Amino acid sequence: MKVVVCCKFTPDIEDIQVTPEGGIDLTNALWSISEYDLQAVEAAAQLVNEAGGEAVALTICPENIRSTRYTKDLMSRGNLLTFYRIVNNDFYEADVSVLAKILASAVRKIGADVILFGEGSSDRYYRQTGMQTAAELGYAGINFVDKIAFDGDELILERNLEDEIEEIRVSLPCVLSVASTINTPLVPGMRAVLEAGKKPVVDLDIADLDIGSRPAAAIERIRRDIPPEPNRLKIILEGTPEETAAKLIAALKNDSVL
Amino acid sequence: MKVFTYSENKQISLELIAFAKEHGSDSICAFAADKQMAELLAVSGANEVMYIKLPEGTLKEDIADSIAEVVKSEPKACVLVGSTRRGLAAAARIATNLDTVAISDVKDVNTDNGISAVHMIYGGKLTVTDKASGHYTVLLVSMGSAEPLTQGASSTNITEGIYVAPASTAQVIGHKSKPAGSTDINSARVVVCVGRGVEEQEQLDDCFALAKAIGGVVGCSRPITEGDNALMADEPYIGSSGITVKPDIYIGIGVSGQTQHSMGMIGSKRAVIINQDPKAPFFRKCDYGIVGNMNDIVPVITTALMSVNK
């Protein structure tokens, strides 16, 4: 079985500076693997442990992710064998249809039985890329997958919906976006981190994929506004717990909310 | 412009029709995958209702290709999809089929010059307005977008559409019920929000006791819902990507106040923060802050509230 985990490297949202014109400044941002993708990587490891085969990672990332620390961070997790990268600074704000077309063609090139995504990305959290990639590939796409089991050549899934758990049988190839509750990702050990640095990294060029060039954007961003800061009192209540509690209750009563 | 609506959720379906009307559409076609829903939508303000009968064992979102097929017969159109987990899957398929993108978490729609959608990105740091480059716009709209129209005003016909099977799909083989969602947090007057700093069941119990004493409900921030041994696994969390609350009083316990979360409670009248870490970003975005260990503070506030209520 071949599993491709699609991962995104994202800047820490807290580090994203918004410029007065509504642009974004990522100069001081710390980047890391999107939190939700850690569960997808772990799910890939569990799949391959059970069914054999290999799991590889695929990402579309900006230039800064070429640094070995990111390779080590990702490749130390979940028995990943190869790191496929499509490096391009322009894609950070690209719309989902652009990303899905590129990912789909990269997946076709790499070959996969199961393509895994996280629930969404920690920076945009649109929750669309996995399902749109599935549609591009013409594969079945299931989101919010909370359990994966094998039944012969097929997978039996549990999908965590708002009001029920749906049990699903799906044949391969398929695309699964896993729910953030599917597992608790293991923290890689020192040995895994050391070995991660030696794993093969393959840079894919858009020109070599079957789409040939960057797909046209489906969305035009016509306005960027900075939302107003909420007007808060910012009063720190001090004293013993009893005093603080009394002050809090008095303040809330005075504000006519209690 | 013609507007199509779809949600598998009854309430959201009704709201989407009202939302389309509020934004000036006089040609609304509502999709339904079950007969009962179609009959309800036919008396709820839609100009047209299309019922698509799905084969047994089909995923409900497999209605997507049938919807896209109908939409394509219009030169220009907007598709409103309810932002549920199924809706997210359906919208991605509809959008791909129409060679566009579904815009997530749409807060508002402008119709001045074509259709553009307002939504927030980067955890609420930026509000952006996006417009589809092509002829079709697909928008994901969450529950609560509009007040459903009074039913029964006038009734419209239900037409049966053709089911278009997707290229590849899966079979539904069973259903399991889920424990009912705890409470109606959206309308709660007081929300006690539990964050990463709450680590033990006993601490969680203290938060529930506080909520009870103040007449509120318990909500949570994202970290505490994640992992397979999460304290509040699978609870809907408050945040720009989760649910939005607007209580009179919001009490955050062990919540750091990341932008992603604080955007989900921005409409709260008063925000109270209890956190051990004086550097938590939430102390800069609150009305009343208490720096300290929740074990010392929360039970004392609970007791004080109970004696006030006597």
Image: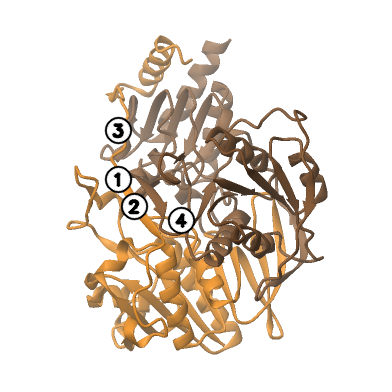
Chain colours: A orange, B brown
Please identify the quadrant where the N terminus of chain A is shown.
bottom right
Marks 1 & 2 on one chain: yes
Of label 2 and label 4, which has the lower sequence position?
4
Could you say whether the residue bearing mark 4 is in a helix, strand or loop? loop
Could you say whether the residue bearing mark 2 is in a helix, strand or loop? strand
B207 versus A256 height, above or below:
below
> Is there CB contact under 8 Å for labels 1 and 2?
yes
Q: Residue at x 30, y 33 (%)?
A: A228
Residue located beneath label 4 in the image: A126
Q: Amino acid at mark 3?
A: Pro
Residue A167, quarter of the rendered image: bottom right
CA distance for labels 4 and 1: 17 Å
> Is there CB contact under 8 Å for labels 3 and 1?
no
Marks 4 & 3 on one chain: yes
Question: Neighbour class for label 4 at 10 Å: few (<14), some, many (≥20)?
Answer: some
Residue A204 visible in the snapshot: no
Residue A228's label in the rendered image is 3
Q: Position of residue B138 (x, y in %)?
A: 52, 54
> Is there CB contact under 8 Å for labels 2 and 4?
no
Which chain contains the residue that carries disc 1? A
Residue located beneath label 2 in the image: A221
Q: Amino acid at mark 2?
A: Arg
Q: Residue at x 56, y 45 (%)?
A: B236
Q: Is residue B127 left or right of residue A178?
A: left
B251 versus A24 height, above or below:
above
Residue located beneath label 1 in the image: A224
Of label 4 and label 1, which has the lower sequence position?
4
Query: Which residue is farthest front?
Result: B75
Could you say whether the residue bearing mark 3 is in a helix, strand or loop? loop
Q: Residue at x 82, y 49 (%)?
A: B35
A142 versus A255 height, above or below:
below
Of label 4 and label 3, which has the lower sequence position?
4
